[in-house]
């Protein structure tokens, strides 16, 4: 019998489950709604601009995801193109200047401008990709190969490398020959939720907490450990607040060890 968390994830986070959902939900530093729509359209267009997806993923560290995923569109707006060979002609200094202008595009603008530049150059110079980033996921490869291909990019660590095939599967309808190598990508939200559900122990060391979370997710659903990732992240962000969890509205309240059953709904 599978854990209710896994059952719920299967119901809500399946192949193409998020195909009509925006990747940019609103917490950007842009007030213009149209900007968000256009930024989403660019990263959604993996047939024409597969590198926009890859480069957005590479930006997704140290800032809110919504901020990271608008960066390809900011580059497009500045250059007037997102052709990979045109991006290739831009120097690392030019990217640094763009990222580090009056309005910073990222919390670490110079570092991430470097990741962006290196990413573009890798996509063009790499013999396997030769300018076509969709080679990373085309032809139904093993999830292991996709993760390793992402980890080969500068700036891409375990978390982003595991997050990307999960997003491709749910938001883009990209299939893999297996899903067993896609791990949960632990962050503060998913680790807190795992602990409160009683799945992992409370430990002070965040690295140890990360390992506990990864191992438990593998144990819960070895065929696709990362299937619970998006659901736990959303519950952590929208319900399982560190000090005031909204347990009465939380979809996990039927099986959570630490749920609060009170009108005040206040953590104590
Ligand atoms: S029931 Fe409460 S403590 Fe448990 S995961 Fe949901 S919000 Fe967090």
Image: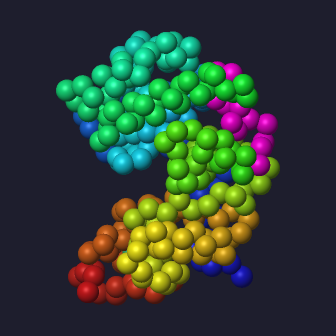
Residue 43 visible in the displayed image: no
* Residue at screen point 37% across, 78% down: 204
Q: Quadrant of residue 106?
A: top left
Question: Magenta span has 166?
Answer: no
Colour mapping used in the image: rainbow
Visible residue check, residue 214: yes
User: Magenta stretch mostly in which secondary structure?
Assistant: loop
Q: Which residue is found at the position 36% from the left and 68% from the top? A: 239
Vertically, is 201 above or below 239?
A: below
User: Which of the image's four quarters has the C terminus?
Assistant: bottom left
Q: Is residue 249 left or right of residue 215?
A: left
Residue 81: x and y in percent read: 47, 13
Q: Please determine whether, in this image, residue 166 is positioned above or below residue 197.
A: above
User: Residue 264 is drawn in which quadrant?
Assistant: bottom left
Which residue corresponds to the image point at 36% horizontal and 63% vertical from the top-left? Answer: 238
Decide whether residue 141 is among the magenta residues. Answer: yes
How many numbered marks does the figure carry?
Answer: 0
Q: Position of residue 159 (x, y in %)?
A: 52, 54
Where does the magenta region start and end?
A: 130-142
């Amino acid at each position: 019998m599978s854990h209710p968390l896994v059952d719920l994830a299967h119901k809500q986070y399946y192949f193409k489950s998020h195909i009509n959902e925006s990747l940019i939900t609103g917490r950007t530093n842009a007030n213009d709604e149209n900007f968000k729509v256009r930024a989403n359209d660019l990263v959604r267009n993996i047939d024409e601009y597969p590198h926009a997806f890859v480069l957005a993923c590479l930006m997704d560290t140290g800032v809110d995801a919504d901020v990271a995923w608008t960066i390809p569109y900011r580059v497009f707006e500045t250059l007037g193109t997102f052709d990979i060979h045109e991006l290739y002609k831009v120097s690392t200094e030019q990217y640094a200047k763009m990222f580090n202008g009056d309005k910073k595009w990222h919390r670490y603008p110079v570092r991430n401008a470097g990741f962006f530049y290196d990413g573009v150059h890798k996509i063009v110079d790499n013999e396997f990709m030769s300018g076509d980033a969709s080679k990373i996921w085309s032809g139904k490869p093993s999830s292991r190969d996709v993760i390793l291909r992402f980890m080969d990019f500068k700036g891409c660590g375990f978390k982003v490398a595991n997050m990307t095939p999960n997003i491709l599967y749910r938001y883009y309808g990209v299939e893999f020959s297996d899903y067993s190598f896609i791990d949960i990508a632990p962050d503060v939200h998913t680790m807190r939720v795992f602990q409160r559900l009683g799945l992992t122990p409370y430990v002070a060391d965040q690295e140890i907490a990360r390992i506990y979370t990864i191992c438990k997710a593998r144990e819960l659903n070895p065929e696709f450990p990362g299937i619970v990732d998006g659901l736990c992240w959303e519950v952590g962000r929208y319900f399982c607040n560190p000090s005031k969890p909204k347990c009465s509205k939380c979809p996990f309240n039927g099986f959570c060890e630490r749920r609060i059953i009170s009108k005040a709904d206040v953590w104590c």
